[in-house]
């Protein structure tokens, strides 16, 4: 009986596979606890972006995710989920300015970014207000 129950649970667990399209799956694809913990402890915010447009290389996204207000080494990229996350200093650059800066850098690749969520405090994934 235990064997049958174990097999049934394993079969059911296989159906709980991430779709890769919902916001939560996109965030999970670039979530790095160490980066987020360090960023929030230093007064930074972390933003998760959907990459929209033509296929953009990892190298192009890494190159774009640097500059004024962006915490060096904080970029996390998931080409499969079309997601980019970065930590940034809100005292040096606002989310709107950051989005515009990254969009300008990605324009030559015919891509743009759509902010999904921003973390300003631990365990607080806030929806981005337009």
Image: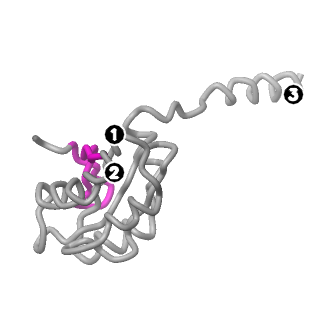
- What residue range appears in magenta? 111-127
Q: Give percent across and percent down for residue 40.
A: 28, 69
106 on left or right of 80: left
The answer to whether residue 19 is above or below residue 79 is above
Separation (CA) of disc 2 from disc 3? 55 Å
Separation (CA) of disc 3 from disc 1? 50 Å
- Front residue of 92 and 52: 52
User: Quick one: label 3 or label 1, which is nearer the N terminus?
Assistant: 3
Marks 2/3 in contact by CB < 8 Å: the verdict is no
31 on left or right of 126: right
> Which quadrant of the rendered structure holds the C terminus?
top left
Which secondary structure, mark 2? helix
Marks 2/1 in contact by CB < 8 Å: the verdict is yes
Q: Give percent across and percent down for residue 109.
A: 33, 51
Q: Nearer the viewer, mark 2 or mark 3?
A: 2
Residue matched to label 3:
2
Q: Give percent across and percent down for residue 4.
A: 86, 22
Residue matched to label 2:
109
The answer to whether residue 28 is above or below residue 95 is above
Separation (CA) of disc 2 from disc 1? 8 Å
Which secondary structure, mark 3? helix
User: Quick one: label 2 or label 3, which is nearer the N terminus?
Assistant: 3
Q: Please identify the quarter of the rendering in which residue 60 is found.
A: bottom left
57 on left or right of 124: right
Residue matched to label 1:
53
- Front residue of 65 and 36: 65
The answer to whether residue 116 is above or below residue 60 is above
User: Quick one: label 2 or label 1, which is nearer the N terminus?
Assistant: 1
Q: Give percent across and percent down for residue 96.
A: 12, 55
């Amino acid at each position: 009986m235990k064997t049958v129950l174990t097999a049934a649970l394993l079969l059911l667990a296989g159906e709980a596979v991430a779709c890769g399209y919902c916001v939560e799956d996109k965030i999970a694809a670039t979530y790095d606890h160490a980066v987020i913990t360090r960023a929030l402890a230093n007064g930074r915010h972390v933003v998760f972006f959907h990459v929209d447009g033509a296929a953009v290389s990892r190298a192009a996204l890494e190159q774009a995710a640097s500059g004024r207000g962006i915490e060096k080494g904080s970029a996390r990229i998931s080409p499969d989920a079309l997601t980019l996350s970065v930590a940034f200093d809100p005292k040096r650059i606002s989310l709107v300015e950051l989005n515009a800066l990254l969009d300008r850098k990605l324009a030559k690749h015919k891509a743009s970014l759509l902010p999904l969520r921003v973390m300003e405090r631990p365990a607080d994934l806030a929806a981005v207000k337009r």
